[in-house]
Image: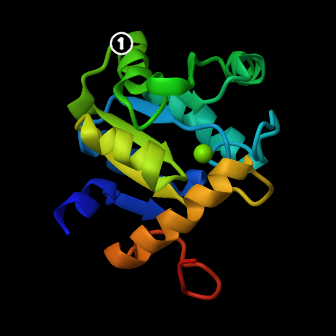
Amino acid sequence: MRCLELFRPDQYVSALERVDLDELADMGIRGLLVDRDRTLTAWRSRQLSPEKCEWMAAARERFSVCIVSNTIFRRGVQALAQELGVPAVCRWGLGRKPFRGAIREALRIIDVQPAEAVMIGDQLSTDILGGNRQGLHTILVRPVPGPEFFTTRVTRVFERWVAARLGLSVTANHRPLSDGTCK
Ligand SMILES: [Mg+2]
């Protein structure tokens, strides 16, 4: 089904810190848009793992980075963004991913064209669909373990169906998962 292809990420990796920054630079990417919940941190958390902290520091040295979050709880996202020294865009309603508002605003803030940007996130129906619709390179990451908003849990059922239809598996050039499968 052709519309399903809009959900297909260009890459699928096991965690944010597995996103290869050298590879993105070689592709001419200048801007990174990064989802917060279950991509950068656990849901509504400000705590980054040491690995993600290190990856963000390396990313900031080479790229313009912006956090893009679907949330009404702006203060937590802004506080995290401030700690990391990057801007953040928080949207809900019709401005949220996969609609155009949040991603367009983030690109404007970091002054990067869609073709020079990557959207990194853990959800096919928000991060990846939103990025693909606007011509960004898209990278799906496996979600950070933990709880999440109840509507997201419902969306995951649809996303698992889409992932199965698309035959998504973690890319071979990144660390293989312990069981070699993609859940
Ligand atoms: Mg997320």
Quadrant where the image shows the N terminus:
bottom left
Question: 174 or 94: which is nearer to us?
Answer: 94
Q: Which residue is situated farthest in the bottom direction here?
A: 179
Assign ligand 1 to one image quadrant.
top right
Taking the spot 52% from the left edge, 34% from the top edge, the residue there is: 59
Determine if residue 66 is in view.
Answer: no
Query: Tag 1's secondary structure?
Result: helix
Label 1 Cα crowd, 10 Å radius (few <14 / some 14-19 / many 20+): few
Q: Position of residue 165 (x, y in %)?
A: 35, 77
Taking the spot 44% from the left edge, 29% from the top edge, the residue there is: 62
Residue 131 vertical placement versus 66 (above, below)? below
Q: Position of residue 162 (x, y in %)?
A: 40, 68
Circle 1 residue: 108
In this picture the colour scheme is rainbow
Left or right placement of residue 23 versus residue 61 in this view: left
**Disc count in the image?**
1
Q: Position of residue 94 (x, y in %)?
A: 45, 25
The quadrant in which residue 179 appears is bottom right
Taking the spot 76% from the left edge, 16% from the top edge, the residue there is: 75
Mark 1 residue type: Arg
Determine if residue 12 is in view.
Answer: yes
Taking the spot 34% from the left edge, 40% from the top edge, the residue there is: 131
The quadrant in which residue 107 appears is top left
Residue 21 vertical placement versus 31 (above, below)? below
Left or right placement of residue 29 versus residue 79 in this view: left
Q: Which residue is situated farthest in the left direction here?
A: 2
